[in-house]
Amino acid sequence: MKTFILLGLLSITFAVSISNQGTLTNPTSRVERIMTKFMQLSEMSTQFNFNKLFDAIDQLSAQLKQSEVDENNLFDADFAQYVEDQAFYTDLVTFYTAEVAQHTEDLRSLNNHLESYQQQLTQRQEELDRTQKQKAQLEETIRQNEITYNKQISDFNTAIDVLDQAIQLLSGLRNPVLIQTESDQLKTLANKLNSINLKNHRVLYQPIIDIFMQIAQNNLANQDLLKKVLSMLNGLRNSLDGGRNALTSNYNSERASNLELLETYNKKIDALVNEVIPMLQDLIANTIEQIKVKTELLNNAQANLDEAKETLQYIEDRWVKRKAQHAALLAEYEKEQALIAQTITVLQRGGVRRQ
């Protein structure tokens, strides 16, 4: 509507301007015909009342002024909304930025804990493997020690039994000349002693073996020699008995120590298998689950942050456009008001006035 009125005003302005220069002849276009009509109106300005025209011009000017006021009021309202929206989404960006930072830090901490738990689990599994090997080695040591002990005890018992037989045989000799049976018995006892593997006592009973063989070969048993031999046999027997007792004592002591160490290994293995390793495995599983949840929270917070940033940028861009639109509208209103003023001036110069 304003465009149509402005076109009319422009036409009047142009027509009045032409009327001051002379009448157009031979009008050929529609615009020229409109101009001619307005020129004729100008020529008849003294005959007609143009108050309605000026009233229409005043009404248009008032409408333009009201439109400018409305635009300024709307612009102020838009600015207030812009400030409110900007503050709201700026706070959202700040909030989600802090939330993303917190979730990121929590994830870093959880991943550090997970790595620590995994390292501890690896160490405890290696410790379990070492302990199980140590236990197996100790059990083998206990088994071998028992075999060795039984063999050595058997040798001691055999040696002491042979010595007892020899002492009994020599103590019963009354005739210096041995009979064949006694000689054979001495040879048998000498062979038994010779077959015994008591390296630490070999130096003690080797002379006895030699004497047995000598007596058996010569078939002679001198009483003085027999007394010396019996004394040696009793001394050797006491030494072997002491060695046997020491062996048993050492074996029992070492066995008790090994069994105590074995119990320590068993307790350690039991704790690792039934407590420590399952606990670490649970911690790892729970931490992995927490990482999944925290990652989802981080992704949601990041999505919210991105959306808030995009919305804030949209608000900023929209405000830039709104300011440009506002400036353009004010310029348009100013231009239209200037055009109206120019039209009134031209009309008045052409003799068209309010009556």
Image (spheres, rainbow, N blue to C red):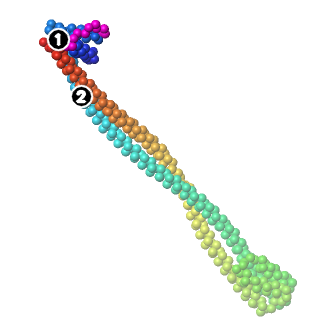
Q: Mark 2 points at which residue?
A: 72
The one nearer the camera, 144 or 213, is 144
Question: For residue 40, which quarter of the picture?
Answer: top left
Q: In which quarter of the image is the C terminus?
A: top left
Q: What stretch is highlighted in magenta?
A: 20-30
Q: Mark 1 points at which residue?
A: 50
Q: Position of residue 204 (x, y in %)?
A: 72, 84
User: Which residue lies at the image location 59% right of the left edge and 61% below the top edge?
Assistant: 131
| Lower position in the chain sequence, tag 2 or tag 1 | 1
Q: Could you tell me which quadrant the N terminus lies in? A: top left
Give the residue at x 27% y 32%: 79
Tell whether label 1 touches label 2 (CB within 8 Å).
no
Disc 1 element = loop
Say if residue 43 shows up in the picture. yes
Disc 2 packing (10 Å; few <14; some 14–19; many ≥20):
some
Query: Who is closer to the viewer here, 94 or 176?
Result: 94
Q: In this view, does 178 lie to the left or right of 153?
A: right
Q: Where is residue 229 in the image (x, y as percent from the top left)?
A: 76, 88
Q: Is residue 236 magenta?
A: no
Q: Quadrant of residue 23?
A: top left
SS for tag 2?
helix
* Residue ID at (80%, 79%): 191
Q: Tell me if residue 58 can be seen.
A: no
Judge left or right: residue 55 versus residue 325.
left
